[in-house]
Structure formats: structure tokens, C-alpha cells
Image (cartoon, rainbow, N blue to C red):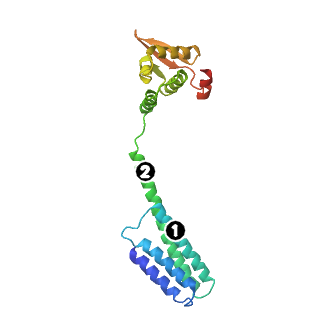
């Protein structure tokens, strides 16, 4: 559809409404609405935005309702009004389809621009939150268990790095408590480090909190 088409359609509407009674308000309401629609269609770059399409669609709906009222008055051949309504409906459908395509394209581009977050990055984010504030023993243990759910195993040194504000001795004490409660298993690696593995992976956080 071109600008010339939109102009010709508006001219045709004016010719049909010329047959309405001269002082009939509907004659001028139809013309006014057609001009509003035309002005939104013949800009340099007709906008394809949700708000613009909604306004255009709403104006076409109103215009078609006006046509229905006019048809009941028998001022002109009903076929002329039916043709006008059909052409305006085509415009409405065309712009709704263009808006749909535009939205889908924009969504696809946004998905492509948004980087996916790896498991490692999620763990780093979680650990960063732990580093930024002091934690209670219960909070530390829950955080450790949550990280173990993602990573399966953690070494003592890795856990210590997550909670730099507490001593390694304190971390060992936390882990001993988790081992006694049957939540974590321990395995020594080398002479200085220890690896911890989650035993119970199906316990909800609230249940774990009550156990601690």
C-alpha cells in the first residue's frame, strides 16, 4: 500500500459522503476520522510501534462503526460503504501484521544481544553477594549448600574464598556441623585441602534451615 492509495481512498470517502444530507453531523465525523487516519499513514516513515498501531486500529474501528450507522440510513448505496469499510480493514490488518513482525524481530535481536549466564558466572555472583556482607553461621551453611547444588563439590579453599571475612577455622567448624547432620561428605585431597560433596540434594531450603 502506497501514499497514493491512502489519498485516493480518502478522496473516494469524500465523494461518498457528499451524498449524505448536507447538515448531517455523521458526514463530517466520518471525514474528520478519515483525515486523522490519513495523517498517520502518509508521514515520511509511518511508525511501527505498539502505541501508534493501536491508535490507528482504534480510529479505523470507529470509522467502520460510522459506516454501519450510515448504511442504516439509506443515504447512499450500501455497497459503496461496504467497499470503503473493507479497504480500511485491509489497512488495519496490514499494519497489525507489520507490528507483529517488528515485535518478533525486536525480541529476537534483544535475545541475541543478551548474553547467557553460565553456571560458573551464577556461582560467582552468588559468592560475590557473600563477600559483600557479614553472614551468620546458618546463612553461611545455607549458602554453601546452595552452591553445592550447582557445582556438586567445593574445596575448603574455595569455600574460604567465598567468605573472606571469617577464618578458615570457622569454615571448618561450619562444615563439621554439616557433616554431622548428614548433609555433606568430606574427602581429603593432598595434604592441606579438603573436598566437600553434597549428600542430600532433594531437601528444600526451608527444610534445611530447620535442620541447622
Q: Where is residue 64 in the image (x, y as percent from the top left)?
A: 56, 75
Up/down of 45 relative to 122, above or below: below
The residue located at (49%, 77%) in the rendering is 34
Of the 4 image quadrants, the one containing the C terminus is: top right
The residue located at (62%, 23%) in the rendering is 210
The residue located at (43%, 74%) in the rendering is 39
Q: Mark 1 points at which residue?
A: 57
Which residue is at the front of the view, 99 or 36? Answer: 36
Q: Position of residue 100 (x, y in %)?
A: 47, 59
- Give me the C-alpha separation between circle 2 and circle 1: 25 Å
Q: Is residue 24 visible?
A: yes
Most extreme residue toward the front, as rendered?
134
Up/down of 148 relative to 5, above or below: above
Q: Which of marks 2 and 1 is nearer the N terminus?
A: 1
Number of marks drawn: 2
User: Could you say whether the residue bearing mark 2 is in a helix, strand or loop?
Assistant: helix
Disc 2 crowd, CA 10 A, few/some/many (<14, 14-19, 20+): few
Of the 4 image quadrants, the one containing the N terminus is: bottom left
Q: Mark 2 points at which residue?
A: 108
Disc 2 + disc 1, Cβ < 8 Å = no
The answer to whether 69 appears left or right of 111 in the picture is right
User: Could you say whether the residue bearing mark 1 is in a helix, strand or loop?
Assistant: helix
The answer to whether 141 appears left or right of 155 in the picture is right
Most extreme residue toward the left, as rendered?
44
Up/down of 128 relative to 200, above or below: below
Disc 1 crowd, CA 10 A, few/some/many (<14, 14-19, 20+): many
Circle 2 or circle 1, nearest the eye? 1
Q: Is residue 1 visible?
A: no
Q: Position of residue 132 (x, y in %)?
A: 44, 29
Q: Where is residue 156 in the image (x, y as percent from the top left)?
A: 44, 17
Amino acid at each position: 500500500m502506497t501514499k497514493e492509495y491512502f489519498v485516493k481512498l480518502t478522496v473516494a470517502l469524500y465523494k461518498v459522503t457528499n451524498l449524505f444530507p448536507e447538515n448531517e453531523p455523521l458526514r463530517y465525523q466520518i471525514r474528520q476520522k478519515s483525515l486523522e487516519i490519513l495523517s498517520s499513514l502518509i508521514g515520511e516513515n509511518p511508525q511501527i510501534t505498539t502505541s501508534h498501531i493501536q491508535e490507528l486500529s482504534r480510529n479505523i474501528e470507529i470509522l467502520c462503526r460510522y459506516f454501519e450507522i450510515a448504511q442504516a440510513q439509506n443515504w447512499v448505496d450500501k455497497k459503496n460503504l461496504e467497499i470503503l469499510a473493507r479497504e480500511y480493514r485491509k489497512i488495519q490488518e496490514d499494519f497489525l501484521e507489520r507490528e507483529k513482525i517488528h515485535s518478533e524481530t525486536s525480541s529476537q535481536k534483544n535475545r541475541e544481544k543478551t548474553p547467557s549466564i553460565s553456571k560458573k558466572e551464577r556461582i560467582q555472583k552468588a559468592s560475590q553477594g557473600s563477600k559483600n556482607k557479614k553472614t551468620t553461621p546458618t546463612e553461611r551453611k545455607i549458602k554453601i549448600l546452595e552452591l553445592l547444588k550447582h557445582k556438586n563439590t567445593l574445596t575448603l579453599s574455595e569455600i574460604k574464598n567465598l567468605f573472606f571475612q571469617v577464618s578458615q577455622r570457622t569454615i571448618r567448624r561450619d562444615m563439621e556441623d554439616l557433616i554431622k547432620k548428614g548433609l555433606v561428605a568430606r574427602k581429603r585431597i593432598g595434604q592441606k585441602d579438603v573436598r566437600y560433596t553434597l549428600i542430600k540434594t532433594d531437601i528444600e531450603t526451608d527444610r534445611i534451615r530447620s535442620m541447622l
